Structures are given as C-alpha cells and as structure tokens.
Amino acid sequence: MKRDRLWYPRPTMPPTDAGPDSGAQYDRFADIYGVWTDTAPAAGANQTFYCQLYNETAGPVVELGVGDGRIAVEAARQGAHLVGIDASSRMLERCRTRADAAGVSERLALQQADFRTFELAAPASLIALPYHSLGHLTTLEDKRRAVERIFGQLRPGGRFVFDDFVVTDQRRAHMRQAQLRAVYQAPDGTDRLLWVTSLLDDSAQRITVITWEDTLDAAGQQLERRYRKLELSWLTPDQARALLEAAGFEIESCWGDFDRTPFDPVEAEEQIWVARRPHAGSQVA
Ligand SMILES: C[S@@+](CC[C@H](N)C(=O)[O-])C[C@H]1O[C@@H](n2cnc3c(N)ncnc32)[C@H](O)[C@@H]1O
C-alpha cells in the first residue's frame, strides 16, 4: 500500500481546530437520536440502501459509527452478520438494547473505537460509514487518517462505502432555518418539542447543528429547555475523490441519491462513494 502518492492532488480544505470528541458529543445526543432519525427525510432511504449492501456482501461487514443500530440491527434482522464500531458508549448501549430486543445480538459484534484508530480481528469485505458520519471528523487531516485506516482494514478487493452532504444554496438556506423537528411524548410521559437550526461556516466547510428540546407540563407550560450541539464538516466531491485516491482506493461509483442515480452536481441530494481496495498487483505502479 502506498500511503503517500504525491502525484495525486492533495485535497485542500481550510485548516480548522482539531475536531471535537465525537464520542462525548453523541453521549449527550443519544437520548434524542431516535426521534432525530425518525423525523429525518434521508433516514429511511439510507437505511434501505445500507441494509441491502450489507446483505449482498459475502465476508466480514463493518459499520463505522454504528450509533444506536438503526441500520445495523435492521440489517441483522434481515440476516446479515456484522461488526459495529462507535466512539460513544451511550450509543453502543442503545445499539445493544435494540439488538437484544430484535433477538439478533449474536449477529452483531460491537466495539468501542475511533474511526481513525479502530482495529479489526479480520480484514473486512465491506466497511460502511453511513449518514454523513465522516463529517464528525472536522479536519481534513483527521478525515485522511480515517480513510487510510479504513483502507488498511479492508481485504484486497474489499469496498468502502460512505455518504456525505452535498451543500447547495438551497440546502444552506434550509439548514439555517429554525425548524420544529418533532412533537412527541418522552418515556417519562412529558410532552416534548424538538427544534433544530444550523450555523454554517462556508470558508471552513463546518456545520454546527444546534438542537433545543422543550419539556412541557400538562398545561403546555415550559418546564425546561435543553440545548445540544453537533459539530460536522463536509467535503466537496473533488476533495472526497482526492482523499480516496490518495489512500490508494479505486473509485467504483459515485451516486447522487440512495436509488443509485449517477452523481450530478446540480441534481444530487447526497454524494455516495463506493471505493475498492485494489487487489495486489492491480494498483497503479
Ligand atoms: C450520524 S450518527 C450515525 C449512526 C448510524 N450509522 C445511523 O445511520 O443512524 C454518527 C455516529 O458516529 C459516531 N462517531 C462520530 N465520530 C466518531 C469517531 N471519530 N469514531 C467513532 N465513532 C464516531 C457517533 O458516536 C454516532 O453514533
């Protein structure tokens, strides 16, 4: 494996501070994650896409950033065996509970580790990083470390599949709005309102997602408001391609949505990359 193929263009992205501790961020986010994904427009489509991918892959399948098992447990329920990796102990706890409830715990091996340093017991056939989660590494250097790590943990011929945001003017405007995301009842019986907005820093390609959750009493009076935030960043398609190629991947496909429509910079809703670790001897010399 050639780690530094200097004749590839090095992707450039404005330097930023070191990323936040993503495990800790999600430890604080874990109890609203279910409501968050249940009300996210992309969540249904990405779940179907990744479940199909896991189930059609022969050999070890790994989901990085497995979270509460939203995708992995459903894939296991459909028959897949997989390894789920996440930095957040509270998300992993939720994943375990979900797998137990679905009766698929024996198909799901969970590991607490970081995208940049995880180590598998056996090389994987597929490593997936769903739901814009590479974005939680907010510097290009950290993303590069993760992509190189993933390359090193795949068997020759194995695939890395991930999706990232496509940040258009329309999406920027939508994300900047303050939106009522969900109205629901918490397990303690209180009524809750979940709100969201995002701050976008275009020059640093950073997104700060800010949520606030209001707890109401039976008369509709606000008892409490709790704020949480998530730090993310996005890659341009050129940066994503350059990162993959610099790590040694061959790019198989880039799709613009979860129906596998070829990527078109104007129409695309997502950038979904399928990259393969070449077999020995098939790499560019
Ligand atoms: C957007 S959630 C995705 C969860 C799940 N894959 C899904 O689609 O619902 C991102 C997950 O990645 C985890 N995560 C973020 N940064 C990480 C890192 N550097 N290493 C390991 N896990 C990380 C978070 O704890 C969180 O569970």
Image (cartoon, grey):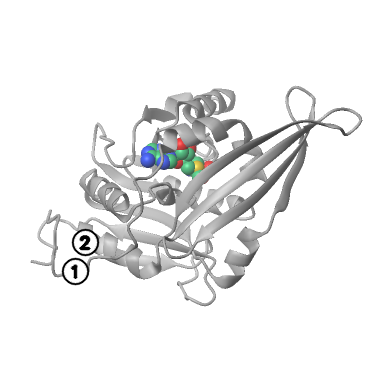
N-terminal-most mark, 1 or 2:
1
Amino acid bearing label 1: Tyr
Q: Residues within 10 Å of mark 1 (few under 14, many from 20)?
A: few
Name which residue lies at 63% across and 66% down.
173
Please name the residue shown 66% across and 48% down the image.
196
Query: Residue 112 placed where, x, y %?
Result: 37, 29
Q: Could you tell me if residue 258 is visible in this image?
A: yes
Q: Is residue 80 visible in this depiction of the protein?
A: no
Circle 2 residues within 10 Å: few <14, some 14–19, many ≥20: many
Give the residue number, with chain letter if any, for mark 2: 246
- Say whether marks 1 and 2 touch (CB < 8 Å): yes
- Rendered location of residue 180, percent (x, y): 74, 49
On the rendered structure, is 199 left or right of 24?
right
Q: Which residue is mark 1?
A: 8
**The C terminus - image quarter:** bottom left
For residue 55, above or below residue 220: below
Q: Judge whether 99 appears above or below 281 on screen.
A: above
How many numbered circles are shown?
2
Tell me the number on the disc at residue 48.
none
Figure quadrant of residue 283? bottom left
Q: Is residue 40 left or right of residue 6?
A: right
Q: Quadrant of residue 190?
A: top right
Disc 1 from disc 2: Cα separation: 6 Å
Please state the horizontal and vertical placement of residue 131, each as a whole percent of the image.
Answer: 49, 50
- What's the amino acid at mark 2? Ala
